Image (cartoon, grey):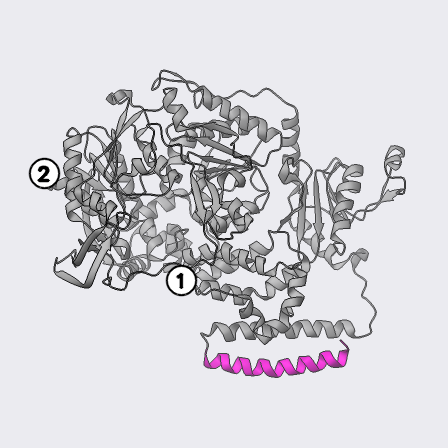
């Protein structure tokens, strides 16, 4: 394009921009006009840059003859402590030795763009800043510079990207450069080099058998398999394996095994920082308080939140909830951790969250009682990449279907490490009717006032639908009667229901049948379903005590994983599940032996025929834990037309999902204050934060005025304690629900209430992760430019829960001018642009749903 043509285009688009700005002024909330204005401005700037390049002028000489990319990289390196002429060498010439010239006969010397070395002059990293021919540049780094200078680390940089390679990588994952967003500091490189030296020294490893692998009086023998597991993982880690999987049944001590493994690796200097990922706050607290506390004297651990990472960045062990990690991972350097352990990895990682783990360049170990196989739904096409993320085996490098270590429920029961059980099927007439032909009804009852609601037509429910929106009080009563008939008074029973509402009705029925005295809490049966973490913890702590109420705990899934209650004698099913994994997890709540209370076996009370459906053999099930994956664009079936509007009904109850239940807890006493709407709860909280005369809150209000102040653990504890006091009666879980921000900490919400730090909108959360996405995966510079230009359109649509198709991008003349025609863009993506767009939608589909 000649300069005259470029100038003409600039003028035309400036006129268009003027009109777009006028329209935006009339419609300030319009995402469409906001995006068009922004992209038109960017396009005009590009045209102006082109015009400058088209003008005849002498090329400006850059400092020390460095390219613009060199200058940018040098500035980045100096900002983190590398010193030019000392530890940072620019275009240093290295002459080849006689032996090296035999290997490279056509090369007498080399002059890398940048070399990073330690204070002794030993080369640590080589950086190449010419990626116009990417294949040639990467080959030169790996084949020539690596062979001659022996660096541990390699970087290849362009204006858009930083590619990284570690010469210590081994196995299937070792073949490719990975995209990163920053460089390592000198001390971090030296640490990695020292760790590798210790790995190859092959020093004999000793494991602390007081934590795992030693004699356990509960089972009367050594837990030998824990030692086998740790030795296997240490050997694989030392061999450079990047992905590992442990399949160990519930009750066999996965957490203690993980703690002993981490202590071993830290003690021998093989790692410095470990990240332990869980998917629930309850499990994070449990990991710190009951797991890593065993080694806290030597290696401290902490629970990381959105507000305390900087304060605790030097702690050896970080425990984090996956929701929190989703918000902060992009701010953590890719090479920060030496090892990631993912607890119950079959739940923690899905398509949208694979980006988080791909960000970190270190080995990862998945630990689960129920590894999962992913298959495409019959007759549909699901990308292989999506299946490999959802499939536990492939995600953790076990493509053959065999984990690195396996000790399942069947083997645990046979060898006497787990309690055997007996399933008893107890189907009421109603359940049999629902299973065989379905239950017919033409009216329901309002759960509060119990007035009759005529449906305007007959409705039929099969067993799979029963007790979701329509709950049978009669069936709840029959279940309660069977529990009384089949258990002794005071025996611990864990009962799984369909929904929160179903659990409430089941607990009512059990308390009625056992003639519970309602004068004080806890009752004979309690539901553990609340979003109030303190209330859940209190109820769980009560249930763990063998001879105290509550004797029956009713839950949907809070009690299905990560809960260690050996005294449970009955696991009861009042809900179906198609998931083999969830079934095994629920069974696992009863498999722990408990000699203190004389429990050496347990009973399964099956009120819905679940054991039969799962083909239970008394030691679990031989059925594979298979996840059937639907295509990303699969449509959901619509619901029946004669369904009344409401959360659920009694057949006929209000769903607590849209209310905040405030409670007051004093020791063993729980007093329910009220159930209030979310908006009212927000007003109470925000007014209290801004007006409370409490000295702790006054002090925090003052400190919050400082930019980037991070509170101490004690201050956070005092803040959470203040929240639970009279007039407020809230906790951190309440705040997360109120502000629809499950990743947030109490400090985040205090800053929001003070107007110091706004809770990020769904759009802002998605936008941040979008930029991380394009700078994590292996895109070329041209591809990154295209993805950056379509960012606003993509993010706006996903945040608004609207889909985005190719026609939405290339049907817009402004976007087409900015990024080119579909054919042109598709060519840049080697014919795979549709696949990239599908991958983006799949990756951020969860984020949008989760954040909205």
Secondary structure character of the magenta stretch overall: helix
Q: Which residues are magenta?
A: 1-27
The secondary structure type at the circle numbered 2 is: loop
Q: Where is residue 60 drawn, in percent x and y?
A: 80, 65
Q: Is residue 457 left or right of residue 706?
A: left
Badge 1 element: loop
Q: Is residue 58 left or right of residue 157?
A: right
Nearest-to-viewer mark from 2 and 1? 2
- The residue lying at 89 percent from left, 35 percent from top is 102
The image's mark for residue 612 is: none
**Mark 2 in CB contact with mark 1 (< 8 angstroms):** no
The residues bearing labels 2 and 1 have C-alpha atoms spaced at a distance of 51 Å
Q: Nearer the viewer, residue 150 or 455?
A: 455
Q: Position of residue 108 (x, y in %)?
A: 89, 42
| Label disc, if present, on residue 755 of the rendered structure | 1
Residue 753 covered by magenta stretch: no
The image shows residue 579 at horizontal and vertical percentages of: 37, 42
> In percent of the image, x 32 and y 33: which residue is there?
587
Task: Inspect this view and state whether residue 321 appears.
Answer: no
**What residue did someone put label 2 on?**
515
Q: Nearer the viewer, residue 619 or 744?
A: 619
Q: Quadrant of the C terminus?
A: bottom left
Q: Is residue 100 above or below residue 413?
A: below
Q: Residues within 10 Å of mark 1 (few under 14, many from 20)?
A: some
Counting labels gives 2
Quadrant of image for the N terminus: bottom right
Q: Is residue 23 magenta?
A: yes
Image x and y of residue 279, in percent = 41, 43
Q: Residues within 10 Å of mark 2 (few under 14, many from 20)?
A: few
């Amino acid at each position: 394009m000649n300069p005259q043509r470029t100038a003409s285009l600039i003028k035309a688009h400036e006129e268009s921009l003027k009109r777009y700005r006028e329209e935006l002024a009339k419609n300030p909330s319009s995402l469409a006009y906001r995006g068009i204005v922004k992209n038109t401005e960017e396009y005009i700037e590009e045209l102006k840059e082109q015009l400058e390049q088209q003008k005849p002028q002498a090329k400006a000489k850059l400092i020390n003859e460095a390219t613009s990319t060199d200058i940018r990289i040098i500035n980045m390196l100096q900002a983190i402590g590398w010193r030019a002429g000392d530890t940072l060498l620019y275009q240093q010439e290295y002459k080849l030795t006689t032996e090296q010239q035999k290997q490279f006969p056509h090369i007498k010397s080399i002059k890398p763009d940048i070399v990073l070395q330690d204070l002794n002059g030993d080369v640590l990293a080589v950086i190449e800043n010419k990626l116009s021919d990417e294949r040639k540049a990467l080959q030169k780094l790996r084949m020539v510079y690596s062979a001659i200078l022996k660096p541990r680390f390699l970087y290849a940089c362009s204006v858009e990207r930083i590619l990284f390679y570690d010469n210590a990588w081994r196995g299937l994952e070792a073949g490719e450069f990975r995209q990163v967003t920053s460089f390592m500091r000198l001390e971090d490189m030296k640490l990695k080099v020292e760790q590798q030296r210790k790995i190859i020294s092959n020093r004999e490893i000793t494991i602390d058998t007081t934590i795992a692998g030693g004699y356990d009086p509960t089972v009367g023998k050594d837990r030998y398999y824990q030692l086998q597991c740790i030795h296997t993982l240490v050997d694989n880690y030392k061999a450079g394996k990047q992905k590992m999987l442990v399949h160990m049944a519930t009750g066999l001590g996965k957490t203690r095994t993980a703690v002993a493994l981490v202590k071993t690796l830290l003690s021998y200097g093989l790692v410095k920082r470990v990240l332990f990922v869980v998917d629930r706050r309850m499990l994070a607290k449990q990991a710190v308080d009951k797991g890593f506390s065993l080694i806290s004297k030597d290696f401290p651990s902490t629970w990381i939140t959105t507000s305390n990472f900087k304060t605790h960045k030097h702690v050896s062990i970080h425990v984090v909830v996956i929701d929190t990690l989703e918000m902060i991972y992009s701010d953590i350097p890719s090479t920060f951790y030496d090892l990631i352990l993912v607890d119950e990895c079959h739940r923690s990682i899905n398509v949208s969250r694979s980006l988080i783990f791909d960000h970190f360049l270190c080995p990862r170990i998945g630990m689960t009682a129920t590894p999962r196989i992913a298959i495409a739904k019959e007759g549909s096409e699901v990308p292989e990449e999506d299946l490999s993320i959802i499939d536990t085996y492939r995600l953790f490098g076990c493509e053959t279907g065999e984990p690195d270590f396996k000790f399942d429920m069947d083997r645990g029961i046979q060898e006497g490490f787990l309690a055997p059980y007996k399933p008893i099927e107890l189907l009421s007439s109603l359940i049999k009717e629902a299973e065989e032909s379905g239950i017919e009804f033409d009216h329901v009852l309002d759960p509060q006032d119990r007035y009759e609601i005529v449906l305007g037509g007959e409705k039929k429910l099969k067993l799979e639908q029963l007790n979701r929106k329509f709950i049978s009080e009669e069936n709840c009563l029959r279940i309660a009667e069977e529990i009384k008939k089949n258990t002794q008074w005071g025996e611990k029973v864990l009962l799984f229901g369909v929904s929160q509402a179903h659990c409430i009705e089941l607990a009512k029925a059990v308390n009625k049948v056992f003639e519970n005295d309602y004068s004080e809490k806890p009752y004979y049966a309690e539901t553990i379903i609340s979003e109030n973490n303190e209330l859940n913890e209190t109820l769980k702590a009560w249930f763990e005590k063998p001879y105290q109420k509550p004797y029956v705990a009713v839950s949907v899934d809070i009690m299905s994983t990560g809960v260690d209650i050996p005294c449970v004698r009955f696991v009861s099913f009042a809900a179906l599940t198609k998931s083999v994994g969830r079934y095994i997890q629920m069974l696992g709540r009863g498999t722990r032996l408990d000699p203190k209370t004389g429990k050496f076996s347990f009973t399964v009370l099956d009120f819905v025929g679940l054991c039969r459906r799962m083909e239970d053999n008394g030691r679990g099930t031989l059925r594979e834990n298979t996840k059937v994956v639907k295509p990303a664009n699969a449509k959901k079936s619509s619901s029946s037309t004669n369904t009344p509007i409401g959360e659920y009904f009694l057949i006929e109850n209000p769903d607590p999902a849209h209310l905040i239940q405030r409670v007051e807890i004093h020791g063993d006493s729980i007093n329910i204050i009220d159930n209030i709407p979310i908006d009212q709860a927000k007003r109470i909280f925000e007014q209290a934060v801004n007006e409370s005369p409490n000295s702790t809150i006054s002090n925090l209000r003052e400190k919050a005025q400082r930019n980037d102040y991070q509170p101490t653990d004690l201050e956070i504890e005092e803040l959470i304690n203040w929240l639970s006091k009279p007039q407020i009666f809230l906790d951190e879980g309440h705040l997360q629900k109120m502000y629809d921000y499950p990743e947030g900490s109490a400090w985040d919400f205090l800053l929001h209430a003070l107007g110091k730090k706004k809770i990020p909108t769904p759009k802002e959360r998605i936008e941040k992760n979008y930029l991380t996405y394009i700078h994590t995966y292996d895109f070329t510079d041209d591809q990154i430019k295209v993805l950056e230009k379509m960012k606003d359109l993509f993010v706006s649509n996903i945040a608004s829960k609207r889909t985005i198709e190719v026609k939405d991008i290339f049907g817009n003349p402004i976007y087409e001018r900015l990024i080119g025609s579909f054919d042109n863009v598709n060519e840049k993506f080697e014919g795979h642009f549709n696949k990239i767009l599908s991958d983006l939608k799949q990756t951020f589909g969860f984020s949008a749903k989760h954040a909205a």
